[in-house]
Image: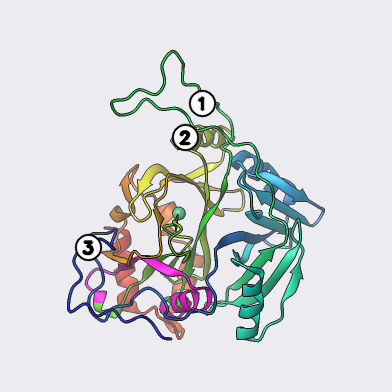
């Protein structure tokens, strides 16, 4: 692949185009492709398969989605923002993640991408209709790029609270009464994916979908071997976008780790969390504030053990910022919040996990004993 070379004559110190304390060293991955096939505008939706759509719908409503469409075979979920739905769950024999769909900025991009990879553009069965091209990333994950003919209209918002902060009170003679109700999801924010082929998969998202890196994480003592995690965003020129739309990390597994949905503010996260806890759902980790991306976060398990996140107040970046570089550690996941859980880190030992590690170590991929040890150290530091 052709990347824009980073050669600034030595270590890059903090400067105005960098949002983090450390940047790249000379010769390190520049975090963007010189000439990508297209530049996707955003994630559109995530696709899942589940045996029980009724149970999925109950959780979806409790978590704060709005039902966009429901048939015997499909459940489309949406947020309040105008645009595409944020999730489709198809009836299937097992509970599994099928893959992400990205939103093309223009219909012509779908055609251009299809021509570049030699695939066909097809109609999609989405509320409102549209066109799509189906690809696979180097991990083997199905990835679609879509263009929706008719974006869904906006729905009423959960109003953000008026806060008395700082020296200028904004609320007088009025009380604060956030309702104890499900958070109202506004939109899909990001998906986190695990891969055994980190560098190849990352480069594919940069080369093919035109995404760019916001932050790299490397294993302590192994920086010269390259990063093992990247938070990547869409390149929309000067328009600010989410710090990460996809986060990719090296690991023994392949595929879905979690997905994140924006709500209006901290009270929505907290009150919506109380609502979920009262109904017996399992909190994985939260509430806290991340470092990479700065989001307020709260992680939950759905009835099929998929992890979903409520988030608010994330960083928005334009295309000019260069990637930050930092060592990976469990304590580096949050600025504040409860200690990170083993459930969130996925480090609870199980026979399935052990099999996954053994298979990964035997295979032709980027995971080797030194990196596995580095990952284990990072997750306990
Ligand atoms: Fe997240």
Q: Position of residue 172 (x, y in %)?
A: 41, 16
Q: Is residue 73 left or right of residue 160?
A: right
Please indicate whether residue 65 sits to the left or right of residue 26 in the image: right
Give the mark toward the camera: 3 or 2: 3
What residue is shown with label 3? Answer: 15
Crowd around label 2: few <14 · some 14–19 · many ≥20 (10 Å) = many
Q: Residue furthest top?
A: 173
The residue closer to the viewer here, 217 or 293, is 293
Are the two marked residues, 3 and 1, in contact with CB atoms closer than 8 angstroms? Answer: no
The residue beneath circle 1 is 178
Residue 159, labelled with which disc? none
Whichever of labels 3 and 1 marks the residue nearer the N terminus, that label is 3
- Relative to residue 271, is residue 12 drawn left or right? left
Residue 362 place in picture, x, y as percent: 44, 83
The secondary element bearing badge 1 is classed as loop
**CA distance for labels 3 and 1:** 41 Å
The kind of secondary structure element at disc 2 is helix
Give residue 289's position: percent from left, percent from top: 36, 45
Image vertical order of residue 339 relative to residue 87, above or below: above
Q: How is the image coloured?
A: rainbow
Discs 3/1, front: 3
Residue interval drawn in magenta = 199-223
């Amino acid at each position: 692949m052709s990347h824009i070379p980073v050669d600034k004559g030595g270590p890059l110190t903090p400067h105005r185009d960098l949002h983090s304390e450390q940047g790249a060293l000379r010769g390190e991955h520049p975090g963007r492709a010189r000439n990508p096939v297209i530049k996707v505008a955003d994630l559109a939706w995530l696709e899942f398969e589940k045996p029980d759509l009724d149970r999925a719908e109950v959780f979806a409503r409790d978590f704060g989605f709005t039902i966009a469409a429901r048939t015997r075979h499909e459940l489309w979920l949406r947020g309040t923002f105008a645009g595409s739905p944020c999730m489709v769950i198809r009836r299937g024999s097992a509970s599994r993640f099928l893959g992400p769909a990205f939103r093309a900025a223009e219909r012509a991009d779908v055609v251009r991408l299809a021509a570049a990879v030699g695939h066909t553009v097809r109609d999609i069965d989405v509320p409102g209709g549209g066109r799509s091209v189906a690809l696979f990333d180097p991990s083997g994950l199905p990835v679609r790029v879509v263009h929706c003919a008719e974006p869904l209209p906006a729905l009423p918002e959960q109003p953000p609270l008026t806060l008395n902060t700082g020296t200028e009170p904004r609320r007088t003679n009025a009380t604060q009464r956030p309702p104890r109700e499900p958070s109202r999801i506004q939109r899909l924010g990001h998906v986190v994916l695990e891969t055994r082929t980190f560098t190849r998969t990352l480069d594919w998202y940069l080369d093919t979908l035109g995404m760019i890196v916001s932050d790299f994480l490397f294993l302590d003592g192994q920086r010269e071997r390259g990063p093992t995690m990247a938070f990547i965003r869409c390149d929309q020129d000067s328009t600010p976008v989410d710090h990460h739309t996809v986060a990719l990390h090296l690991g023994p597994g392949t595929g879905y780790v979690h997905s994140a949905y924006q709500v209006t503010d901290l009270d929505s996260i907290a009150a919506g969390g109380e609502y979920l806890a009262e109904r017996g759902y399992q909190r994985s980790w939260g509430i806290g504030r991340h470092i990479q991306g700065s989001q307020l976060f709260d992680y939950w398990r759905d009835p099929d053990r998929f992890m979903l996140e409520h988030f608010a107040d994330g960083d928005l970046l334009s295309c000019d910022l260069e990637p930050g570089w930092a060592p990976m550690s469990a304590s580096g996941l949050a600025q504040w919040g409860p200690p990170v859980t083993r459930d969130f880190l996925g480090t609870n030992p199980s026979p399935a996990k052990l099999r996954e590690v053994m298979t990964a170590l035997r295979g032709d991929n980027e995971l080797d004993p030194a990196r596995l040890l580095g990952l284990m150290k990072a997750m306990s530091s």
